[in-house]
Image (cartoon, grey):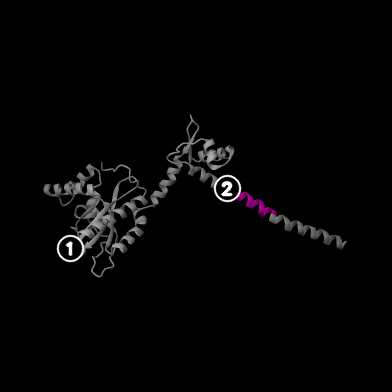
């Protein structure tokens, strides 16, 4: 009696030991299927591009090397979530507005201060001069970054300070790429009031900045310094910020000015690209 009881107990224990790994294996297989479906859905979305804006199930099936039934199931799920849309006539699929909404959330997180910092510090280390980032607010600009030169003779940083936009190279390079109505309003509405002669000078300067793509002049807001600045464009092409390099005038000659102008423009373009700006889209001021 005792012997039989021992046998049954042993069998029961054996069954318990075997059953647990089997359950874990089944759960792992289920998770793997889920992960595989998610990966397949992501791959499906990535098939679409400018040349292949609308695709049918057969084409998607070939691209993904998956059965039509699998692709149809994935497309139906993505359609229900708004990540795909379907043409009612051709029954082809295209990317949906749900993706645009998700992208907009990412874009909101990408502020100019977050995407520009490392590029500006790299520029400062390269040219060894003060490198600044300013934003346009009303008729004034505010300095958000001013990375100080490592040179013994250097300019005092203006971090957090404000200045009239028309009195600084960074401000003028932002004004230059506004709409015509906005430029007019900024030049007429600035306090203290600008004379007609001064406004005429500024309009000529704006024309020059638009042609060159940057501003390079003696910085009115800081005597004894030269500033080179370039506009930073948001994803929609608008200009609400600019970067600049400010240098003591004794360290500037024609060759160095050319180098600084080129590097400031290149850095501003790199920041604009990070913000989502496409360089071949039309400028808003035109």
Magenta stretch holds residue 246: no
In the image, residue 112 sits, relative to residue 129, either above or below, namely above
Where is residue 228? Give x, y as percent: 23, 56
The answer to whether residue 285 is left or right of residue 41 is: left
Snapshot quadrant of residue 248: bottom left
Q: Does residue 191 lie above or below 60 as drawn? A: below
Q: Name the residue under label 2.
A: 36
| Residue pointed to by mark 1 | 224
**Residue at horizontal 47%, vertical 37%?**
94
Q: Give the range drawn in magenta.
A: 22-32
Q: In which quarter of the image is the N terminus?
A: bottom right
The residue furthest bottom is 152
Q: Which corner quadrant of the image does residue 9 belong to? A: bottom right
The residue lying at 30 percent from left, 46 percent from top is 238
Find residue 187 and report its horizontal and vertical position in percent.
Answer: 18, 47
Evaluate if marks 1 and 2 touch, with contact meaning CB atoms under 8 Å apart: no
Q: Does the magenta stretch include residue 27?
A: yes
The answer to whether any part of residue 164 appears in the image is: no
Label 1 to label 2, Cα distance in Å? 64 Å
Q: Is mark 1 on a helix, strand or loop?
A: loop
Q: Answer whether residue 92 is visible to the viewer in this image.
A: yes
Residue 222's x, y, as percent? 19, 61
Front-most of 18 and 263? 263
What kind of element bears circle 2?
Answer: helix
Q: Is residue 97 above or below residue 240?
A: above
| Neighbours of disc 2 within 10 Å: few (<14), some (14-19), many (20+) | few
**What's the mark number on residue 123?**
none
Drawn side of residue 175 relative to residue 108, left or right: left
Residue 54 appears left or right of 37 = left
The front one of 59 and 147 is 59
Dot 1 or dot 2, earlier in sequence: 2
């Amino acid at each position: 009696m005792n012997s039989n009881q021992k046998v049954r107990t042993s069998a029961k224990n054996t069954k318990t030991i075997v059953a647990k790994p089997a359950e874990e294996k089944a759960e792992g297989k289920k998770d793997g299927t889920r992960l595989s479906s998610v990966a397949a859905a992501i791959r499906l979305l990535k098939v679409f591009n400018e040349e292949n804006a609308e695709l049918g199930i057969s084409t998607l099936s070939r691209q993904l090397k998956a059965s039509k039934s699998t692709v149809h199931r994935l497309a139906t799920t993505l359609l229900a979530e708004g990540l795909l849309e379907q043409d009612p006539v051709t029954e082809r699929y295209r990317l949906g507005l749900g993706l645009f909404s998700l992208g907009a959330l990412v874009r909101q997180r990408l502020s100019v201060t977050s995407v520009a910092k490392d590029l500006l510090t790299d520029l400062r280390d390269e040219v060894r001069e003060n490198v600044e980032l300013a934003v346009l607010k009303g008729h004034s600009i505010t300095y958000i970054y001013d990375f100080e030169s490592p040179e013994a003779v250097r300019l005092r940083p203006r971090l957090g300070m404000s200045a009239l936009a028309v009195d600084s190279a960074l401000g003028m390079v932002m004004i230059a790429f506004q709409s015509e109505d906005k430029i007019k309003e900024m030049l007429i509405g600035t306090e203290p009031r600008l004379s007609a002669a001064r406004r005429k000078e500024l309009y000529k300067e704006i024309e020059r900045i638009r042609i060159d793509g940057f501003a390079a002049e003696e910085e009115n807001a800081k005597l004894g310094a030269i500033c080179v600045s370039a506009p930073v464009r948001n994803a929609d092409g608008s200009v609400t910020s600019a970067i600049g390099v400010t240098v003591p005038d004794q360290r500037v000659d024609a060759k160095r000015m050319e180098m600084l102008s080129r590097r400031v423009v290149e850095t501003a373009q790199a920041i604009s690209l990070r913000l989502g700006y496409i360089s071949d889209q039309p400028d808003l001021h035109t």
